[in-house]
Amino acid sequence: MTEKKLRLFKLGVLISGRGSNLMALHQHIQSATLNAEIAVVISNVIDAPGLAWAQTQGLTCYGIERKIFPSKAEYEKKITDLLTSHHVDLVVLAGYMAILGKDFIEHFRNRIVNIHPSLLPAFPGLHPQRQALAAGVTESGCTVHFVDEGVDTGKIIAQKTVPVLPDDTEDTLSERILKEEHQLYAKAIEIVANRL
Ligand code: GRF
């Protein structure tokens, strides 16, 4: 058995907003349906509800805004150093609303995952649920994928399909997909953990 298998798989979770995927991952870990540990939470929005919640849970967390750094490269260097100092095995984007730079992606190549509320490669980028409704599809869902330099283009790890109903609004479809995201992310992370 390797040293990595003897210790818990460490996640570094990057958020910008409400943090429901972060909460779901924490819940999976608490109930032992995900064998991992949230080593650090970093939000690029100081007043993100997800960051406030992480504090209440006693998770190690930081709010670090891009604007206090002279450049995006320096901001991302700070994030890289924090993730490294917390010995993170996998960087987990959970509603992190910023495009990661080349150096960051290269540094953590194949160790950054994201969750996106569509069945990629369909509907990448912003408002995927709105895009799905506009396209008139009868099924949508969510995808967990590795992050590369493109927008939602990295290798797919896992997907879950949900129906799109005739009377769906962006809100009702988002809610149906989000419920599945909260299950899929933990499963996908377990898959990655077993591969690394
Ligand atoms: C989720 O729908 C996720 O798929 C997308 O951003 C949203 C984040 O929600 N990338 P939350 O902050 O995890 O609640």
Image (tube, rainbow, N blue to C red):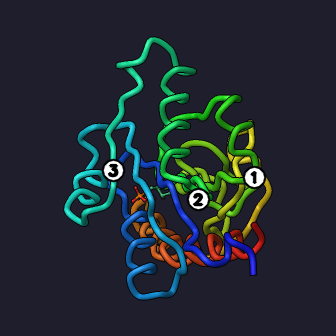
Label 2 to label 1: alpha-carbon separation: 14 Å
Give the residue pinned by disc 2: 115
Give the residue pinned by disc 1: 110
Which secondary structure, mark 3? strand
How crowded pointer 3 is (Cα within 10 Å; few <14, some 14-19, many 20+) is rated as: some
Residue 26 vertical position relative to residue 81 in the rendered view, above or below: below
35 or 33, nearer to the observer = 35
143 or 186, nearer to the observer = 186
Percent across and percent down for residue 75 are: 48, 25
Percent across and percent down for residue 135 are: 66, 55
* Residue type, numbered disc 2: Ile
Disc 2 Cβ-to-ligand 1 distance below 8 Å: yes
How crowded pointer 1 is (Cα within 10 Å; few <14, some 14-19, many 20+) is rated as: some
Disc 3 Cβ-to-ligand 1 distance below 8 Å: no
Which residue is at 48% across, 45% downward?
Answer: 96
Quadrant (top left/top right/bottom left/bottom right) for the C terminus:
bottom right
